[in-house]
Image (cartoon, rainbow, N blue to C red):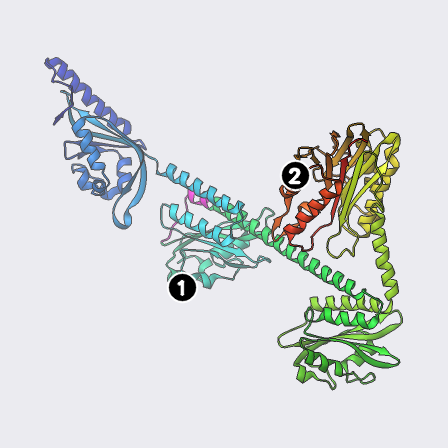
């Protein structure tokens, strides 16, 4: 028996009796209080910590009926506590009489396969006798394992959501989710996620890190349907399916041997559904022994099925985006190819040169070999060829098809006017063996008068013609026919397009008093289409001038129509309206009221009005969804002019905020379209910072044209001289010094 330091035996028996009675009553009250409580309680006696009494919760926590004994030392009943230091803590409390409290303390209960991890908030209190001496220790605690597990589950769930948000690969997310559940589950569980095919009729392997590989391979591709295991049935029913005993459940008749080989005896499957109710897959929890789920198990399934659904939907959306971008890129590549070749074909008015350029454009882009034949004076003449080597080209050029032979592919296409394709050598004589030809595509060259020639593409080796190549070749052949037979008309149309683009811009820069005006326009690609960028500077009354720079959604004739509408509306209404905001509102009204056949695209715009003064320029401007104008002051500091304003041409209502600005002499206002800042070097954009640096690094008092040169040189250096992806337009207004 240990005396509590600082205490003495009571001098009077009466006081000792009172203490003894009080201590006994308190101990009795504790046992009564914790007898039916969920908190654990144990009373230990002596230095050996003999277990005198404990409540049911204590025995349940330490291991159930096998350890429900009293009258034995705690270290003997629970030997695992010795190595974990808990017996030393009991010794310290017993010796010192000082209470010890632990918070969220980890303890491993049990040994071997039956060991489990638990967490407790607990207190060791000394038990005192009537003389104030320590006679034992009382253990009072509350198990916080579920709270701890909930915290860990929440943290892991948050980590999974963060993975989904940053678009981590789907297999990585699903595998991580499965391992989280397996690690946190109180009993051994094996998690599986199956993914539904696009038609929802089959399930494919998604993740199952702990199931045997042969099992995953066997169920990969199972059908969805009634009675097809737990997962196939859950996918078919669109609701959870609980199979507590695989050995007796009819759903598993076709998979029972497989499950027995994999060592699984129960399977609870929850369908993973998209927000629109479509099937995404299934989430399954397997157990080694027959078992029915508790409500907590079902809640866990619902939570992680929802998480898996979010990950799968995000993955599918990303795949759809990538496919759309791939299709868009392929379409852009095809369009660029057609535009580039069309430009090449229309280089001059020599038809033979046009066909030679056609052959070179087709080989090897569309096929390894190409030959062009036309009818001249009632005979077939081979006018162009293209091949990988000079010898092959000479051999191909030496072959002349027979015009009136039905055994010749060229003759048949000339007669029928329809394309012919085959995965074999052409019929009729020819150098097919020497050239290694394995297939051909022969396309007619036609005009209003009928067929006047053919373009023959020849395969070698493993090359095959697919539908995409055929369509592209036919389109290119159609363009070549137009170029050859109507060269002058084609040239006229090209000139018309250039004239239309020029008509949308200023033919000559106006002389604005007190102002240097400089402009720049560069279309994307080869410039064969009408761009959507535009600018204008025009006079108003009382010495004022209007100016604008904008970007029309889209390209081509429709963009030109919209550009013309914006420019002409501005020039017409600006002299009649009081300020820049009213002009932009009038432009927006004209755009909203235009016929749908004239386009429906939106417009971004910066419109302003300037007034020369004795000490610079007074400017009022409005920004409608456009890139921020830049003000370069005399100290070479660049100030973005961030005035709010939504793009126009969509809604009758506008949200515009006018901004007034004064340019001192040698200060400049720089307007530009997003083709400048979005110029690319691989996946990196030129951006606003490089644009600002290019302006700030110009020499003192730069002229307006010097600023444009600085910008274009910086963009060209950044892109390495490569073609840009979007049109570029720049307008610079620089205040000049007074005379």
- Looking at the image, which is closer to me, 656 or 76? 656
Which of labels 1 and 2 is toward the front? 2
Query: What residue do we see at 85% from left, 51% from top?
Result: 500
Displayed quadrant of residue 506: top right
The circle on residue 696 is 2
Residue 251 x %, y %: 47, 58
Q: Bounds of the magenta span? A: 289-300
Say few, some or many: other residues with alpha carbon within 10 Å of mark 1 (under 14 / 14 to 19 / 20 or more).
Answer: few
Relative to 335, say whether 27 is above or below: above
The C terminus sits in image quarter: top right
Q: Residue furthest bottom?
A: 429
Circles 1 and 2: CB atoms closer than 8 Å: no
Query: What residue do we see at 77% from left, 65% from top?
Result: 344
Say few, some or many: other residues with alpha carbon within 10 Å of mark 2 (under 14 / 14 to 19 / 20 or more).
Answer: some
Report the side of 55 relative to 714 (left or right).
Answer: left
Q: Is residue 294 magenta?
A: yes
Report the side of 86 relative to 495 (left or right).
Answer: left
Residue 494 x %, y %: 84, 58
Q: Is residue 382 magenta?
A: no
Report how far apart the C-alphas of labels 1 and 2 lie in the structure. Answer: 76 Å
- Where is mark 1, residue-wise? 257
Residue 605, can we see it? no
Report the side of 538 relative to 109 (left or right).
Answer: right
Residue 131, can we see it? yes
Number of labels in the image equals 2
């Amino acid at each position: 028996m240990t005396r509590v330091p600082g205490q003495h035996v009571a001098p009077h028996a009466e006081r000792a009796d009172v203490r003894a009675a009080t201590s006994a009553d308190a101990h009795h009250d504790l046992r009564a209080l914790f007898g039916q409580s969920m908190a654990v309680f144990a009373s230990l006696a002596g230095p050996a910590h003999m277990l005198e009494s404990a409540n049911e919760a204590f025995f349940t926590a330490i291991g159930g009926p096998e350890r429900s004994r009293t009258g034995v030392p705690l270290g003997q009943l629970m030997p695992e506590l010795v190595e974990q230091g808990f017996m030393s803590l009991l010794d310290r409390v017993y010796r010192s009489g000082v209470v010890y409290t632990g918070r969220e303390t980890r303890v491993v209960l049990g040994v071997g396969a039956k060991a489990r991890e638990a967490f407790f908030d607990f207190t060791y209190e000394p038990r005192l006798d009537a003389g104030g001496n320590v006679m034992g220790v009382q253990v009072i605690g509350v198990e916080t394992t579920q709270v701890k597990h909930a915290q860990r589950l929440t943290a892991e769930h948050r980590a999974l959501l963060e993975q989904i948000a940053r678009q981590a690969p789907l297999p990585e997310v699903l595998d991580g989710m499965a391992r989280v559940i397996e690690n946190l589950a109180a009993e051994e569980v094996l998690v599986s996620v199956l993914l539904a095919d696009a038609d929802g009729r089959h399930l494919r392997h998604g993740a199952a890190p702990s199931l045997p590989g042969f099992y995953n391979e066997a169920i990969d591709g199972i059908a969805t349907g009634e009675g097809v295991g737990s997962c196939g049935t859950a996918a078919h029913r669109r609701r959870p399916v609980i199979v507590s005993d695989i050995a007796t459940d009819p759903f598993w008749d076709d998979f029972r041997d497989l499950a027995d080989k994999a060592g699984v005896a129960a399977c609870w499957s929850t369908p993973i559904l998209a927000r629109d109710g479509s099937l995404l897959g299934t989430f399954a929890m397997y157990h080694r022994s027959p078992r029915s789920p508790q409500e907590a198990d079902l809640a866990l399934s619902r939570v992680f099925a929802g998480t898996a659904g979010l990950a799968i939907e995000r993955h599918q959306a990303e795949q759809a985006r990538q496919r759309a971008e791939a299709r868009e890129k392929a379409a852009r590549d095809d369009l660029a190819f057609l535009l580039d070749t069309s430009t090449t074909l229309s280089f001059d008015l020599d038809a033979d040169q046009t066909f030679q350029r056609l052959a070179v454009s087709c080989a090897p882009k569309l096929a390894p070999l190409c030959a062009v034949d036309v009818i001249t004076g009632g005979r077939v003449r081979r006018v162009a060829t293209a091949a990988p080597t000079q010898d092959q080209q000479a051999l191909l050029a030496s072959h002349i098809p027979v015009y009136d032979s039905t055994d010749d592919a060229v003759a048949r296409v000339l007669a029928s006017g329809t394309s012919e394709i085959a995965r074999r050598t052409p019929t009729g004589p020819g150098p097919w063996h020497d050239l290694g030809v394995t297939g051909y595509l022969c396309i007619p060259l036609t005009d209003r008068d009928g067929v006047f020639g053919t373009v023959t593409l020849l395969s070698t080796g493993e090359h095959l013609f697919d539908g995409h190549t055929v369509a592209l070749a036919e389109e290119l052949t159609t363009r070549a026919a137009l170029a050859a037979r109507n060269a002058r008309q084609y040239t006229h149309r090209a000139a018309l397009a250039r004239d239309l683009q020029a008509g949308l811009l200023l033919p000559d820069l106006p002389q604005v008093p007190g102002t240097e005006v400089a402009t720049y326009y560069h279309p994307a690609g080869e410039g064969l289409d009408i761009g959507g960028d535009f600018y204008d500077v025009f006079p108003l009354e009382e010495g004022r001038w209007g100016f604008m720079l904008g970007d029309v959604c889209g390209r081509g004739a429709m963009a030109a129509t919209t550009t013309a509408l914006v420019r002409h509306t501005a020039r017409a209404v600006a002299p009649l309206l009081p300020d820049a905001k009213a002009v932009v509102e009038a432009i927006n009204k004209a755009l909203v009221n235009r016929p749908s056949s004239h386009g429906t695209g939106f417009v971004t715009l910066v419109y302003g009005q300037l007034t020369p003064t004795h000490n610079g320029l007074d400017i009022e401007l409005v920004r409608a969804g456009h890139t921020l104008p830049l003000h370069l002051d005399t100290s070479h500091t660049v100030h973005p002019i961030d005035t709010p304003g939504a793009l126009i041409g969509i809604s009758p209502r506008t949200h515009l905020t006018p901004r007034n600005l004064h340019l001192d002499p040698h200060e400049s206002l720089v307007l530009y379209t997003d083709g400048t800042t979005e110029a690319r070097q691989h996946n990196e954009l030129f951006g606003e910072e490089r644009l600002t640096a290019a302006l700030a690094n110009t020499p003192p008092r730069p002229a307006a044209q010097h600023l444009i040169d600085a910008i274009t040189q910086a963009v060209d250096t950044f892109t390495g001289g490569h073609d840009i992806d979007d049109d570029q337009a720049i307008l610079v207004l620089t205040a000049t010094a007074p005379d």
